[in-house]
Image: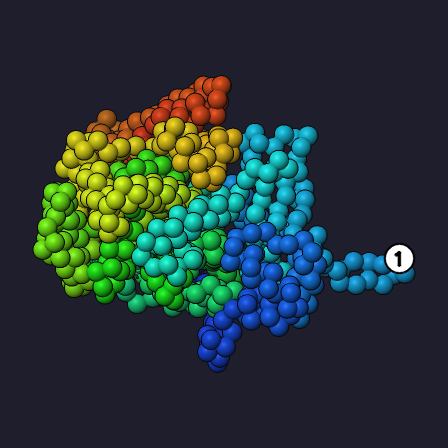
Amino acid sequence: MFVYFHDNPHFFQVPSQKFEKMASIRFVALEKSLDHHPVHVEAPSEKISDYFGEHVFSDRFMQQFMSEPAYKSVRSSILHGTPLERKVADLVASGMKAWAISKGATHYTHWFQPLTGRTAEKHDSFNTPLRDGSSFESFDGEKLAQQEPDASSFPHGGIRNTFEARGYTAWDPSSPAFIIGKTLCIPTVFISYTGEALDYKTPLLRALHAVDDAATAVCQYFDKSITKVTATLGWEQEYFLIDEALVQVRPDLLLTGRTLFGHSSSKGQQLDDHYFGSIPSRAHAFMREFEREAHLLGIPVTTRHNEVAPNQYEVAPIFEECNLAVDHNQLLMDLMEKIAARHKFRVLLHEKPFAGINGSGKHNNWSLSANAPKHRNLLAPGSTPKTNLRFLTFLINTIRAVAEQADLLRASIASAGNDHRLGANEAPPAIISIFIGDRLTEILEDLEKRTEKTNLSSDEKTELKLNIGRIPELLLDNTDRNRTSPFAFTGNKFEFRAVGSSANCANPMIVLNSAVAQRLNLFKKEVDKKINGGTKKDDAIIEVLRKYIIESKRIIFNGDGYSEDWVKEAQKRGLSNVKSTPRSLDFFLSEKARELFSSLKVLSDRELEARHEISMENYKMKIQIESRMMADMALNHIVPVALEYQRLLIQSITGLKEIYGDDFKSHAKDQIDIVEEISERVGIIRGSVYEMIEERKKANKKESVRDQAIDYCEKVKAYFDTIRYHVDKLELVVDNLHWPLPKYRELLFTR
Ligand code: ADP
Ligand code: MG
């Protein structure tokens, strides 16, 4: 009798008596995965606009549910980035409660982003019992503004002593409350009793405030009516979608989010047949459902497509104000994971779940937008010489800022997962450089040369202005998009492409906005000094811009960022190329970083040190878990299976000996080869695992978390490749029926 794995192209007939004994748990999972038919999602008869934002306490609901003074106070807090006035908090809370209850909410939570990298929530019921046995729904200003989470186990890097375990969460009015399920979620900052930031949102808000002030001041040179500048962010989220049954029997995917073992599949992404291909129906059903949920929450997701690697996809929204965009990305990652479960999928947000094929990133598209004339993108060239000079001002200041803080930007995207991507010929290298395209490079070179002389004749000045005026036409055909650059100007925004797929965008956004704020402040000072010295405003601006072009030229690179030549060239130019997370995290404690963050009041020294320690600890833990998982899988899953197969071979050899006597060797040659290969590889695997465990013990004894993290990176992780190499070779040797782990072809091609 045979069990026939019909429908599934990868399987042959398996004798069923043997199935239980021989065929591994992998076959059970594969059989299960065949039952996972597409979940039928009812096509909503309404248009998206009918339900978009229904679960968000947005402006229209605030006006409907709040009194006029309460509404005005919230608007002013949002506009000025100030805390809500205590005296209206009760009114705001009662409006919010009325709205939430009208939508069926029974609980509320302060929703925040601790330094674990994900979001946290603790639900409390609105319902308050009374002595007479009845109850009522209560929620007041105090509960809205501040809460004391009993949460002493969030990472704090020494900021919070255990005897002072309180942390406070306070509503951030610039991010509206929303409802998930039956819970009202209130986006909050999370700070210690002594006022230090314990989350991502607090420093992000401070950085956004700083860039608003700095950019608005610079805008005054060009347009007095500009009173506010907003940083905008549009992220593009890449992810893998893997059948849940298969993930359940891959302990590495379950516990670390990536495959620690797995020989590459015969077919991977060579044919480029997945990218922009037609979306498989199961994946499509999943996308439609999470997009609907996202739209209810006001997350403006618009784009979906297949990515380069098999079973890899991307989702992207329309850009939004930076703080809101960060919240929405965090929220969406959560939603995707929850909804995937309903579709028997597992979403992998890890940067590198599979070796040998592309990993996942999260491009951060960034720009600055002024409030006058209505939503003016400061990185879009305008139609007059004046608006183009403004464009050049923001473009060149950003380039100068990135050149100055390149190391810190590199550190802002460092993580154990992203280490596998950066420089791995699929993602930008760990060297931060900027792509601006040939045309823009020529324009900057021209500006630099033309203004070499300090005293331009009036004709020369006219020509310069004319040239600046021509920028939009020149940029129109500037379509060459270089995909290998970590930081690219793409026509009207910069795209930070080195961000990891699982990252909280806040980290890179804190650094980028702070760096630009700092540079714009210095720019203003330099220009003002020249103006006070008698130079005309436009000339002063052009002179400082010219200086900035010269100072930051070395970071501009339009060539192939994946090439070996660039690595050498970058070294000549003195650009850093720090490949590991722990080494790059040290940039956070450099004098330059301290100066940047403290002068803008984004992060104090103490906060920086705490963050540095938390990131180091997080890195160490991740590698420790991977290392343990690897040892467990190698010793408990792989080696026994390899030895079992070896035993069968030895039986066969013994049988041959019985038949052929001393002559058996010529008949058993291949079996003997395999027996020897298994012994050799098992020996190396076990030897390496035990040596790795010894290195772990040594690393754990190191005094500081930083030294531990460095040892985990440089000494413990050093064994991963060897162990993996031999396990993957065994995968090709051991009988397919025995192999316990779903193989790459199964994980990546099961739809
Ligand atoms: P790609 O070719 O890299 O996929 P797209 O042109 O599709 O890039 O756009 C990528 C993202 O850029 C979108 O999420 C979009 O919302 C965002 N974007 C466009 N303009 C801006 C802007 N001014 N500020 C921030 N993000 C922007
Ligand atoms: Mg992109």
- The residue sitting at 35% across, 50% down in the picture is 218
- The residue sitting at 63% across, 40% down in the picture is 167
What residue did someone put label 1 on?
Answer: 131
Q: Position of residue 640 (x, y in %)?
A: 42, 34
- Displayed quadrant of residue 286: bottom left
Q: In the visual, does 570 lie left or right of 115?
A: left
- Displayed quadrant of residue 735: top left
- The residue sitting at 12% across, 54% down in the picture is 458
- Res. 327 visible in picture: yes
Relative depth, front residue between 325 and 118: 325
Quadrant containing ligand 1: bottom left
Considering every residue shown, the one lying at the far bottom of the view is 45
Q: Tell me the crowding category of disc 1: few under 14, some 14 to 19, or many 20 or more residues within 10 angstroms, Cα based.
A: few
Q: Quadrant of the C terminus?
A: bottom left
- The residue sitting at 49% across, 65% down in the picture is 298
Q: Position of residue 456 (x, y in %)?
A: 12, 48
Q: In the visual, does 728 lie left or right of 35?
A: left
Q: Quadrant of the N terminus?
A: bottom left
629 above or below 494?
A: above
Q: Position of residue 625 (x, y in %)?
A: 47, 34
Relative depth, front residue between 25 and 534: 534
Applied colour scheme: rainbow
